Amino acid sequence: MRTMKEDNKGKTVLITGASNGFGMEFAKLFAKDGYNLILVARSTERLKKLGYELQDEHELEHVCIITADLSRSGAAEEVYEEVRKSGITVDVLVNNAGAGVHGYFYETDLEREKAIMQLNNFTPVELTKLFLQDMKIRNSGKILNVASVVSFMPSPLMAIYGATKAFMMSFSEALSEELKDTGITVTVLCPGASNTMFFRRAGAAHTRAANGSLSEPEAVAKDGYAALMNGDTRKVSGFMNQVQTVVSGVVPDSAMASTMRHMMEEETEESAEDKD
């Protein structure tokens, strides 16, 4: 009987934001199952260390490292062209890279928010368009888009981030329906607050959400990987996150917005003591 690793021999996955967090865990899961890797992020050294360690450990045929700032317009096409020129076929696309910024919208920096919208929306849309066209010719492929539980609700103090993730969920589920009679699947993963570098980079490390119960990136990646391989359209990672998304469907948006604002406000000494 053939193993999954043998079945995947010669297949390649492209993962954005692969240098840490969910992206790193996705790379480990794909490599374990025999997929060759194309790892994309800004940190060349981190990508090389991860990629070549996984190549040696799992005896992968090839690992391709692409250094790119995906928050820059035109980066997606450059990544696609580099892959095309290498002659590598991308069997699975994982649009994982993303970022947010914490604060009141009237105070936050517009240029940073434009870069976040590029990273969270425009770049994954462009990558999906380019690689999906190739997949359609072969009638084979898988796409995983990382959204968030905030896709289901307004997100005060992270308004742009929440809006970009709502877009990604709607976009992914629409594509999934368009492609349902093909050999291509599109899956959207919706994790909750997780133990990654996200909150620190967003300037939200002192919020209640960042200091509450956090999912581990390894568990989130496993949920997303399993859903992708199963051809599921949507996966909300974590039981309590699943409950939260169900509640968001029956509770008025104004109430959800109030709750989310509370979670994204900075945790005071008094509120921290209340938890002890």
Image (cartoon, rainbow, N blue to C red):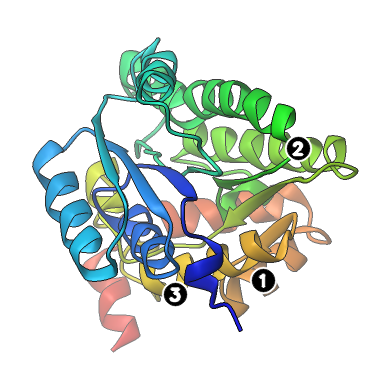
> The residue under label 3 is which amino acid type?
Ala
Neighbours of disc 3 within 10 Å: few (<14), some (14-19), many (20+): some
Q: Which of 17 and 101 is in front in this view?
A: 17
Question: Residue shown at 63%/59% (left/top)?
Answer: 228
Is residue 195 among what the camera can see? yes
> The residue under label 2 is which amino acid type?
Asn
* Image quarter in which the C terminus is found: bottom left
Question: Residue shown at 56%/75% (left/top)?
Answer: 238
- In the rendered image of this protein, does residue 251 appear above or below residue 42? below
Q: Do the residues labelled 3 and 1 touch (CB within 8 Å)?
A: no
Neighbours of disc 2 within 10 Å: few (<14), some (14-19), many (20+): some
**Viewer-nearest of labels 3 and 1?**
3
Question: What residue would you read off at disc 3?
Answer: 219
Position of residue 223 measured from the top left corner of the image (x, y, whole percent)? 55, 70
Labelled disc at residue 31: none
Neighbours of disc 1 within 10 Å: few (<14), some (14-19), many (20+): some
- Separation of marks 3 and 1 at Cα, in angstroms: 14 Å
Question: What residue would you read off at disc 1?
Answer: 242
Q: Which of marks 3 and 2 is nearer the N terminus?
A: 2
